Amino acid sequence: MRFLVLSYVALLWIVASLVSRGQGFWPFAAGIVALGATLLAFRRGRRRPLYALYLCALIAAVLGLAFEAVLHVAPSVLSGHVANVAYTGYHWQRGGIYSLDDHLGPVMRPGVRRTMYWAGHWWEHDANADGYRGPAVARADAVFLGDSMVYGHGVGPDDTLPARFSARTGVAVANLGQQGTCQIQSWLRLERLGLRLRPGVVFASSHFTDVGEATQWYPPAELERFLLSPLDTPYVPLAREAYRPRPPWDPVSLWARRLSLPFRSGGVGGALARALLERGPGLGSGTAGGWRAPSPAEIGAPFTAVLPGASPEDALGWRVHVRAIRQIRRLCDGAGARLVLFDLGYPRGFSQAVEALAAELGVEYNPAGRLALERALAAQPVYLVDDGHWTREGNDIVATVLARSLSER
């Protein structure tokens, strides 16, 4: 009997991990309740419910593990959003590359290496002991801030923008980029990780998604407190509740972060349900819904956040963007480091707004992103297929132009 119960619990652990990466606690708890009910029946002489429950768990585990094996042997069986969720490491559950922080939201876990996937592209993620991608350095001549363009989404560790910059210039760099971040998070990463590296220059990438991501990660009330606080003693906003650490006793979080097995199958159920409900890219769609090389309309689009009549959310996001870059400049001034702003080169309205901000702050603007865009329009492979992140060649182009900031000084 003891062996039966223990093996059932082990099978239930596997099944619950296969069912859901983040919510597997609930099927596990339901299975334990079912076990308790069948044990009561067993004591009353009814053995069949316990054996039936065990058999169901065994069949579910075998079928689930078979499906898991398929996802490893033939990952192309999934595509679109479902494949992104199944194979990605961009999460803070077991097997993901993130943990959660009260002020930063997701932060890269130190010392994590794993294979990543998005939109048909596979690459190796490598976070060093200090929690950023690439080799850990005691001192960095150049520190890079930004989102996935700087992190190196879709490319290997030697092909990221900071790595290509280091290869071209021979200087030590620190890649503090992280996927999906806004300028508040870049400011805090510079303060926590970058300043101790005593950089001579800080390259800060602005992305048009930063505006929306500020309000995605932080509640409006927290952003307003940040904007109203003094520049020399800024208020550090709290991330939204969903992106902050849960108490150690929270069973759902404990399961997701510590107890769940890191199966690819654990992300399939929820992703497939959302793909069907939203009629978005899913199984066999042929596209993952990622970025693509920008169209002429996207390139020429105005930047509405700075125009009269902008939505309150967009206007707030831009104000936060500007204020966070001011904080980055304050840190650079205090550390004796030069600040260089750059962007993707499009939409033109946003790129012009970033250049104007650099002039207002009295810092350097580098047009590297604009040159990369020109090369892409001339049919060079600057962007990943079905995904608008820079390829190794794109990162080389941007790194070459950024390197002029060193040679000119």
Image: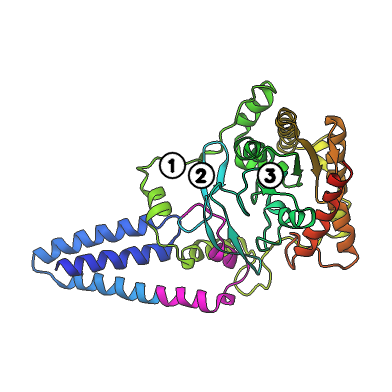
Distance from label 2 to label 3 (Cα)? 26 Å
The residue singled out by tag 3 in the image is: 140
> Residue at 51% of width from left, 44% of height from top?
100
Residue 7 included in the magenta stretch of the image: no
The kind of secondary structure element at disc 3 is loop
The kind of secondary structure element at disc 2 is strand
Instruction: Kindly indicate whether the residue at mark 1 contacts the one at mark 2 (C-beta within 8 angstroms).
Output: yes
Most foreground residue, 190 or 305: 190
> Residue at 56% of width from left, 36% of height from top?
103
Q: Is residue 212 left or right of residue 124?
A: right
Q: Is residue 371 left or right of residue 164?
A: right
Mark 2 and mark 3 lie on one chain; the one further toward the N terminus is 2
Crowd around label 3: few <14 · some 14–19 · many ≥20 (10 Å) = many
Q: Is residue 260 left or right of residue 58?
A: right
Which residue type does callout 3 highlight? Ala
Crowd around label 2: few <14 · some 14–19 · many ≥20 (10 Å) = many
Q: Is residue 44 above or below residue 149?
A: below
Task: Give the image quarter of residue 8.
Answer: bottom left
Which residue type does callout 1 highlight? Arg
Residue 4 seen in this snapshot: yes
Which residue type does callout 2 highlight? Leu
Mark in front: 2 vs 1: 2
Instruction: Kindly indicate whether the residue at mark 3 contacts the one at mark 1 (C-beta within 8 angstroms).
Output: no
Residue 302 seen in this snapshot: no
Tell me where residue 253 appears, x and y as whole percent: 41, 48
Task: Give the image quarter of residue 292.
Answer: bottom right
The residue singled out by tag 1 in the image is: 246
Residue 67 included in the magenta stretch of the image: yes
Distance from label 2 to label 1 (Cα)? 9 Å
- What span is in magenta? 65-93
Q: Is residue 143 above or below residue 88?
A: above
Most foreground residue, 340 or 33: 340
